[in-house]
Amino acid sequence: METASHLPFGAALTARLGPPSRPSLLESSPRSRVWRVELAGRPAVLKQPVEAPEADERYAREVAALRIAGRAPGSPVVPALLGTDPAERVLVLEHLDHRRPAGDWIVGWATALAGLHSTAGPQDAGALPRWQGPTAADVSSFLALAGALGVDGGPGVRGELHALVDRLGRAEGTALLHGDPCPGNDLHTPDGVRFIDFEQASLGSGLTELAYLRIGFPTCWCVTRASGPLLERAEAAYRAAWHERTGTVLAEGGLADACAGWLIRGDALVQRAHRDGTDHLARIPDEDWAWGTATARQRLLHRLGVVAGTTSGDGDLRHLRTFAGDLRRAVLARWPMLRRVPRRRP
């Protein structure tokens, strides 16, 4: 049984917010401890990253992201940050009631994501790290996997993939990126969607995360695929919200690049704790493993289909389009019992 005296709630927080009461430990990732408490009779959330080499960085990212996102005009996109204690790496947040998402939840999610992305600007440079895209090592691993499955794209595909890595590395944008805007990190409240858990936040192009809707939430346990009409509604909602918040029109190009970038990243096949430098794409021919709603091979199959359908026949990724389709057929020939990723979130 948790008691208030055991909470990491120091004198400075107590002086500002009053003493906490009625603490209860909430479910969270292994990287943090999270409690529900009451402050002056009202619920709040207390969060503390666990001791680890990167705990200070994760805490700093979350605080910076919440402060930037807290500037959102109109409908909030994050819980209010009520207080911090840097010495103990503690955040105190507004408590929000979450209700089961509707069947078309990705539309509200996309609207809120655009609102989140739009809160940062050039003035925030340096407040968070820049988003890091795939590397040349990812290209090599992806092509090695294709070779192991008997598919050779030739120099055209290799050249396109290295050019893709270069473009993603130079992609402009000052959007506030969540880093893991997935089911479980979105709270569906009566007033709209709000995002939590910003330990991986960065700055970059919003297309990186808009691509989640097509590519299947690549950093998340919960992979889903949307029907064509619903996907179109959600992407249109993002673009409309972006225009409303920024007064600018989101460029049409770049979404295919973002999807292709997620395809070649082996780390997007495993949860964060296992992103340790292992070549996870190299494991695919000999083993499959479950993570949340899909296995690694299911994730790969879905992403190949998306890239084959998203890239154009005359653009920068025209060779990759054909290659992805060929590789998808090779995956199905090797493992014909693979199912498609689910449509609904649990």
Image (cartoon, rainbow, N blue to C red):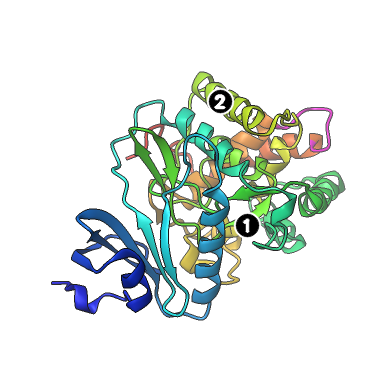
The residue drawn where x is 50% and y is 57% is 198
Mark 1 near mark 2, Cβ–Cβ under 8 Å?
A: no
* Relative to 135, residue 254 above or below: above
Q: Is residue 168 left or right of residue 49?
A: right
Residue 119 placed where, x, y %? 61, 44
Q: In the image shown, does 215 or 88 lie closer to the viewer?
A: 88
Instruction: Give the residue type that dot 1 points to.
Output: Ser
Magenta range = 311-317
* Relative to 323, residue 197 above or below: below
Q: CA distance from mark 1 to mark 2?
A: 23 Å
Residue 282 placed where, x, y %? 60, 62
Is the magenta region chiefly helix, strand or loop?
loop
Residue picked out by circle 2: 237
Q: Is residue 333 visible?
A: no
Q: Is residue 251 left or right of residue 175?
A: right
The crowd level at tag 2 (other Cα within 10 Å; few <14, some 14-19, many 20+) is many
